[in-house]
Amino acid sequence: MPQAKTTTDTGSSTNPQSEPAGPANIETMPPGMGPGVAMAAIYGSLAHSTGILYENAVAAQKQQTIAGDVLCFIAVLEALARSAPAAKTAASAVSDDEEVLKLLKALKAAA
């Protein structure tokens, strides 16, 4: 009885982003291809760095937006506390500085 052939998956990826730029075997590369491969590597590095730059900018903008929202919320609470008879209780409550510190610590923990 003949035995069945077994094949194993080599795990080759079809994702073009995971493939290296240029020929797989650098020793068989034609001599005129070197500058193009070098430029491709430089361009890939530049694109990756630009992506990281934009990721950091979006994260910083998000943190600034949250901080602005917190300050706006505190300003509304202050205005409400001063305009109502609750001003007496607001004066005896926890100081605003401690509230701001608590909110900023929560913001830092969430980031």
Image (spheres, rainbow, N blue to C red):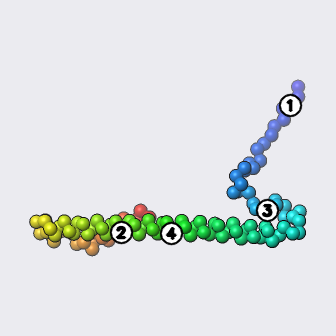
Give the structural element (helix, strand or loop) at label 3: loop
Give the structural element (helix, strand or loop) at label 2: helix
Regarding residue 23, the answer to whether it shows in the image is yes
Query: Residue at the location (66% across, 70% down)?
Result: 46
Query: Residue at the location (84% across, 35% down)?
Result: 5
Q: CA distance from mark 2 to mark 4?
A: 16 Å
Of mark 2 and mark 1, the one earlier in the sequence is: 1
Q: Is disc 3 in contact with disc 1, using a CB cutoff of under 8 Å? A: no
Of mark 2 and mark 4, the one earlier in the sequence is: 4
> Quarter of the image containing the C terminus?
bottom left
Q: Which residue is mark 2?
A: 68
Q: Amino acid at mark 1?
A: Gln
Which mark is nearer the camera, 1 or 4? 4
Query: Residue at the location (80% across, 40% down)?
Result: 7
Q: Which residue is mark 1?
A: 3
Regarding residue 105, the answer to whether it shows in the image is no
Q: Which percent across, then down, holds residue 8?
A: 78, 42
Q: Is disc 3 in contact with disc 2, using a CB cutoff of under 8 Å? A: no
Q: Which percent across, then down, holds residue 17?
A: 69, 57
Q: CA distance from mark 2 to mark 1?
A: 72 Å
Q: Amino acid at mark 2?
A: Gly
Q: Which residue is mark 3?
A: 22
Mark 4 surroundings within 10 Å by alpha-carbon count, few (fewer than 14), some (14 through 19), many (20 or more): few
Q: Which percent across, then down, holds residue 95?
A: 22, 72
Residue 57, which numbered label?
4
Which mark is nearer the camera, 2 or 1? 2
Q: Amino acid at mark 3?
A: Gly
| Relative to 84, 98 lies left or right | right
Give the structural element (helix, strand or loop) at label 1: loop
| Relative to 61, 49 lies left or right | right
Q: CA distance from mark 1 to mark 4?
A: 60 Å
Mark 1 surroundings within 10 Å by alpha-carbon count, few (fewer than 14), some (14 through 19), many (20 or more): few
